[in-house]
Image (tube, rainbow, N blue to C red):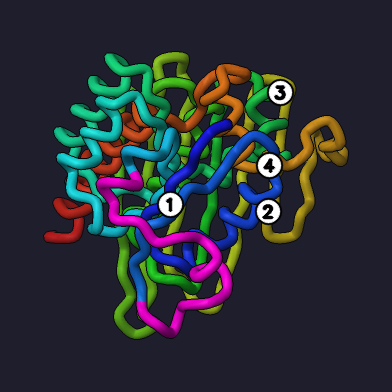
Amino acid sequence: MLNIGLIGKTEILEPHVKRIQKIKGVNIVGKTSVGTDAHLNSFHFSIPEINRIELIERADIIIMDNSSILPFKMLCDIVKKSKHIFTIEYLKLTIDECSQLVSLANESGSVIQVTNPRYFTPATQWLNNHLITPTFLDISYVTEETITDSTLISLLLMLIGTTGTSPKKIGAVTFRTKETESKFNNVRLEFGDASVVNINYGNLPPLNEFKIKSYSPGQFVTLNFSTKVFQCNNKPINLSEYPPVNEIDRFLHVVQKKSKQISNIEDYLIVLYAVQKINKKIMQFSTH
């Protein structure tokens, strides 16, 4: 039996808890909550509230959001004790802090999995298994929502399984339009096998679009996540062999050593390095 402890905001944790409660062989021992009375509901009261020190001691696994309720030192202590962590949001870590967690996880055998929902979609799984390299990968992500580092992190984590390694060269530019309150960013990643990833992302209301196109020798792929149209060489892609994967299920399989790690803290570190370089280039561009 795996004992699970929850740390974070009730409204963020609840959908994942509902999934966990359906899985055999796991037991939620308690939670340390963050939030206001407005978010309290039956879920909040059905799981006992425990102070975070006791919760960490009793749990084999911690599932958490990015709340500041857990100091970095305590996060390190969890990993040192060989306990496992699933983050349902992106932890606010510096590169040095993330590097420390990587080292501690390697020493203790702790599994730290970072949320990566785009990676586990059937279409992305198909791409990871069928993409011919070298490739030119063109990604377009346009939303009405505010663009943050988390937007870029989610796209780069999605690519970990496709590109495999960190890029050798990074370029980035940004354009803003005050009149329409729009922002457009372009990132170009070049890899050692001559593959190129071109990412266009931004806040361009009222548009909402997410597409991936790849151009490879003898292969042209279009994945339109907005319209749910997925094609290879102008023919529909059969995704029946790639059912949606639940991240919590996958994480528990990794903890039980039934699957290899995906979207782990080392992948997150690679992405943080890339985001740092991209932000530096964007800041330089925006000063001109």
Point out the tag, 4 or 1, that comes first from the N-terminus: 1
Q: Is there CB contact under 8 Å for labels 2 and 4?
A: no
Residue hosting label 3: 130
Residue 10: image x %, image y %?
Answer: 45, 66
Q: Say whether residue 156 is visible.
A: no
Which amino acid lies under the numbered mark 1 shown in the image of this protein?
A: Leu
Residue hosting label 2: 225
Quarter of the rendering containing residue 252: top right
Point out the tag, 2 or 3, that comes first from the N-terminus: 3
- Residue 23's label in the rendered image is 4
Q: CA distance from mark 1 to mark 3?
A: 37 Å
Which amino acid lies under the numbered mark 2 shown in the image of this protein?
A: Phe
Residue hosting label 1: 6
- Select label 1 or label 3 by which is in front: 1
Numbered disc 1: secondary structure: strand
Q: Is there CB contact under 8 Å for labels 3 and 4?
A: no
Point out the tag, 2 or 4, that comes first from the N-terminus: 4
Front residue (pair 33, 54): 54
Which amino acid lies under the numbered mark 3 shown in the image of this protein?
A: His
- Select label 3 or label 4 by which is in front: 4
- Select label 2 or label 4 by which is in front: 4
Q: Is there CB contact under 8 Å for labels 2 and 3?
A: no
Q: CA distance from mark 4 to mark 1?
A: 16 Å
Residue drawn at x 54%, y 27% as measured from the top left: 161
Front residue (pair 154, 210): 154
Residue drawn at x 34%, y 67% as measured from the top left: 34
Front residue (pair 103, 288): 103
Q: Residues within 10 Å of mark 3 (few under 14, many from 20)?
A: few
Numbered disc 4: secondary structure: loop
Image: magenta residue range = 36-55
Q: CA distance from mark 2 to mark 3?
A: 18 Å
